[in-house]
Amino acid sequence: MSDLLTVRDLRVTFSLRREGAMPWASPTLLRAVNGVDFTLRAGETLGIVGESGCGKSTLARALIGLVPATGQAEWIDGRDLLNLTPRQMMAYRQDIQMVFQDPLASLNPRMTVGQIIAEPLVTHRPDLPRAEIRERVRAMMEKVGLLPNQINRYPHEFSGGQCQRIGIARALIVEPRLVICDEPVSALDVSIQAQVINLLIRLQKELGLSLIFIAHDLSVVKHVSDRVMVLYLGKVMELASASDLYGSPQHPYTQALLSAVPVPDPTVEAARTIVPLKGDLPSPMNPPSGCVFRTRCPRAEARCAAEVPALAGGDHAVACHFPGPLTEAEIARAREVA
């Protein structure tokens, strides 16, 4: 399986001025994504998880050029997507598409469904006749579970799940190789979430897509992902196959996240060991020294404050000086301070 996208030292930094600061005062730097490395293989799904504010959505927007970033994002043809001009990047727009979190807000209310889905084709394939564009739009609507006779309706006439299907159709109409899904089901009801997830899985198999799937729901991520990357304050804490990461998490942060996932079996739920997270997420404008997770980690030692852990371990990579399952004493210590 060839590598579709190779990301190295990806960084996104925002320069902010505090309210009431003097004009000559130096701005504060917010490091939303702080040196992320990963590889996406052709045809696979990479899940990205982490708390709100950890840089998941910013990472996604950096990959498609919606926010400026530094580092390297090498496409399969060898070009660095982060260092292309807007005109050069246009050639890759149809290869990399995005499905956004809020299905209704991502659609133009003044355009019909047919116009919304056809817009990428009109932009990237201006040579196509109108009749062929309309035929492709109808075919794509059927593929995502929409009725072709709804082509002249407006977004407000559809439910949230239907609007997300429209967004998926718009992303797929130009036959991309990579689709970035930024929490595509978080705004939907649970029953509709399952329908949209199954639709994405089916379309991925049919069209040979690669997916980057961002979500808070770790159960959903486990269901759709081949590999999972755990982010915390803009850094990768753990990266492994879904089976390895869920079966044997090595980073204390990953263990805490997984222990918070409810189990529908009351007997199993009562017997589970919960690893609480103490305190709140630190500000990305003033992250902790060394390991950024150390202020909430029950295993932190002096080395964690002085030295940044490297992401190491091959197929199951962990950024921790002391990886491995937490002991009962460490879990008890976490409960005392949580």
Image (cartoon, rainbow, N blue to C red):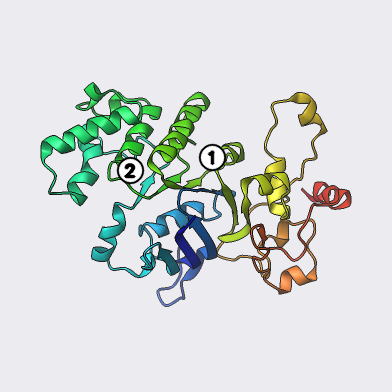
Q: Quick check: can you spot residue 242?
A: yes
Of helix, strand and loop, which one carries label 2? helix
* Whole-percent x, y for residue 159 in the image: 37, 25
* Up-down relation of residue 267 to residue 168 (above or below): above
* Up-down relation of residue 289 to residue 335 (above or below): below
Give the number of marks. 2
Of helix, strand and loop, which one carries label 1? helix
- Residue type pointed to by label 2: Ala
Front-most of residues 234 and 197: 197
Residue at 69%, 43% (x, y): give it. 258
Is residue 152 rendered to the left or right of residue 206? left
Q: Quick check: can you spot residue 113?
A: no
| Image quadrant assignment for residue 236 | bottom right
**Residue at which label 1 appears:** 224
- Residue type pointed to by label 1: Val
Residue at 42%, 66% (x, y): give it. 74
Is residue 46 rendered to the left or right of residue 287? left
**Residue at which label 2 appears:** 171
